[in-house]
Amino acid sequence: MTAIASPVIHNLVGGKWVTSTSLAGIELLNPATGEPLGYSPAGSAAEVDAAVLAAHTAFASWRSVPAVDRVQYLFKLKALLEQHLDELASLITIENGKTLAESKAELRRGIENVEVACGIPVLMQGYSLEDVAPGIDEIMVRQPLGVCAVITPFNFPLMIPLWFLPYAIATGNTVVLKPSDRVPFSAARRLELIQETGLPDGVVNLVNGGKAAVDALLDHPLVRAVSFVGSTPVARHVYARGSASGKRVQCQGGAKNHVVVLPDADQETTTKIIADSAFGCAGQRCLAVSVTVTVGEAKDWFRDSIAAAASSLKVGNGLDPASQMGPVITQASRERVVGLIGQGAEQGAQTIVDGRGTRVNGGAGSFVGATVLDGLPATSPLMETEIFGPVLSVVHADTVEEAVAMIERSAYGNASSIFTSSGAAARKFRTSVSTGNVGINIGVPAPMAYFPFSGWKGSFFGVMHAQGRDAIEFFTDKKVIVERWPKEWSRKF
């Protein structure tokens, strides 16, 4: 049994649910069982246009609603998300594959962003100064942009849209959400809950589809801003095409995250945390560790320790409370990950834990077991490939400086971590490493909602990141007003 009420996928346009008239896009299967869930529509420019026009119409009145009144809908949304947390987590697990515990944790992080956005009456404030010249005052205020597009991936179907959506509407914008065509059901359920808050029709709209829908949003003249999370090649496309249309664009791309282990790291805890980072969510997260760099004598113990941790993981249906890791999103993704593991072995790595033969329930699901590759050559293309699966490569360096240089050579710059009991080594690492998010004895350095989700190099395109104060900057325009109300007129300024 599934928690999906209907296999038919609808768009939400101006407060009305409408069936997509575009061609069928992809068949959706439960990644754990292979059970059919429905078909995701391909999307069309006409459907995008209808959603954008509805958002544009709603913007005229929504922008004038006082900020303190706008956030009341977010307070209601937070309560509804809490109330329906178990239901939503089950839905995420069914269409994405991650475990129920991971789905619930995802929701918690999303709810944190709703909470932060409730502070918009303070966060959106401008500033002023009297008498910048005799009798002249100057004021800076923030105003909303208009229609904002939010394009999100499959791996965190409820959390990632909440990096953007609450801030966008709280600052007075309207939104067209285009979720991944792999996970449309949880997106629709979230929009139903948003409707329950009483939010005016058209403030948030939903349009489903693939590349045709994305390009239509990037080209639409009424879309003022685009927020995107996905792979680096697609992020480059979205950033280039959206910027060429004069839009404000922020694009979170892919990653190849490194963790450095020093000899003085706590062996048991370090291993557990790195295993959680590498294999949690089946490795399908942009902050998952992909490469562990052991330094000096850490090589002697880490290899066997991480192999034992990977081998002990119970892989299964995410709805089973005993499962510690679920499947990857599709059979095509499984085949890709299995192929990359094979490439690593061919290029000289030793497969000390091999998850390629993992089968659950007769092999119907898209499962790959936790895999550890030891000694992957520095020249291997896999050192730069975002595998997006439960695969950890272990390499060695003689010094911290050598490990940092490995990270510097990477085209990505999303996250890196170090495990050590030395404050001096940790401080040097965090100062010199070339990634936007840094963990010290933290396996997944995911920023809290009131900090920006940073990213450097090929992991981010734009200026302002998701979440917190960066989100306020991204979703507002600054307007500076210089005013004079003299008793006697003067031309001096």
Image (cartoon, rainbow, N blue to C red):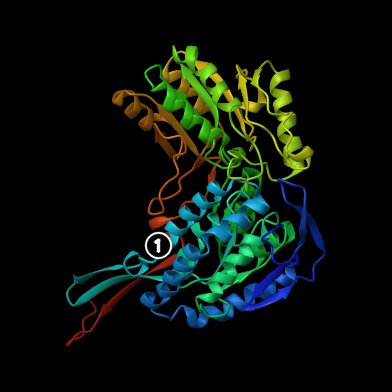
Q: Position of residue 392 (x, y in %)?
A: 59, 28
Look at the image and tell me in which quarter the C terminus lies.
bottom left
Residue 30 is situated, as x and y percent measured from the top left of the image, at 72, 51
Q: Quadrant of residue 391?
A: top right
Circle 1 is placed at which residue position?
Answer: 115
Q: How many marks?
A: 1
Left or right for 330, reference 465: right
Q: Is any atom of residue 394 visible in this view?
A: yes
Q: Is residue 240 above or below residue 192?
A: above
Q: Nearer the viewer, residue 416 or 479?
A: 416
- Give percent across and percent down for residue 92: 61, 54
Residue under the image location 48 percent in, 26 percent down: 271
- Name the one closer to the observer, 478 or 442: 442
57 lies left or right of 427: right
Residue 98 placement, left or right of 331: left
> Which element type, helix, strand or loop, lies under badge 1?
helix
Quadrant position of residue 160: bottom right
The picture quadrant where one finds residue 362 is top right
